[in-house]
Image (tube, rainbow, N blue to C red):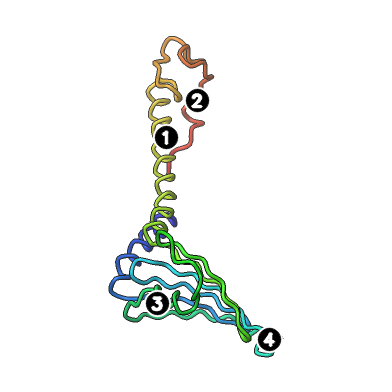
Amino acid sequence: MVSLLLFVGAVGAWMGSYTWEFEVWRETTPDYQGIKISLGEMEVELGQTTGHFASTRPDPAEWHWGTRLPRGFARELARDFAGSHAPVAGFFVGRASGNMFSYTVIVFPMPFVVTLLALLPLGDLIRYRRRRRRLRRAKSGCCTHCGYDLRATPDQCPECGRVQVAPAKIEEPV
């Protein structure tokens, strides 16, 4: 169920990213983690303050979120990673360092993220259908593996050779 909610949320964020730029970030001294979704792309940013600006005592983590009009990441990537390679098929990985900071940026196209998240509920659906099929076959007196009629030989399937399990021991799908 959680995998389906993640998938639906990712599709909603993808569609909404053409109207709004969504941003979630967490700041602690000296670390920063953030995720932005804008114009069909997702940017993951991991940063750290360095040098004398870095505190020796970390602050408690606070999560923040915000929205704004979508800008896309191309302009920011060109500015922050001048001389670096251009994004390939919407994917980009870059690392920048300065006197006060260092950070890494990873950009994914949202269709890639949505496709990955679609595999999880698809796997759940396949497992659910297989359990239902095994239970239905066992209740009707057929082999749970191949579906062969077992009225003549209820202990072992003559077709595939599997030893049969009593229908009561096959768990009901949830």
Tell me: residue 158, above or below residue 12. Answer: above
| Secondary element type, mark 2 | loop
Q: At 43% from the left edge and 22% from the top edge, which residue is drawn?
A: 146
Which of the two discs, 3 and 1, labels the residue nearer the N terminus? 3
Disc 3 marks which residue? Answer: 75
Provide the residue designation for mark 2.
166
Circle nearer the viewer, 2 or 1: 1
The percent position of residue 169, horizontal first and vertical second, equals 51, 31
Mark 3 residue element:
helix
Mark 4 belongs to which amino acid?
Gly
Q: CA distance from mark 3 to mark 2?
A: 64 Å
Image quadrant where residue 134 sits: top left
Which residue sits furthest bottom?
52
Position of the N terminus by quadrant: bottom left
Question: Which numbered mark, 3 or 4, is in the foreground of this view?
Answer: 3
Q: Which residue is mark 4?
A: 51
The x and y percentages for residue 39 are 33, 70
In the rendered image, the quadrant that contains the C terminus is top left
Which sits in the foreground, 91 or 47?
Answer: 91
Residue type, label 2: Ala
Cα–Cα gap, marks 3 and 4? 28 Å
Crowd band around label 3 with a 10 angstrom C-alpha radius: few (<14), some (14–19), many (20+): few
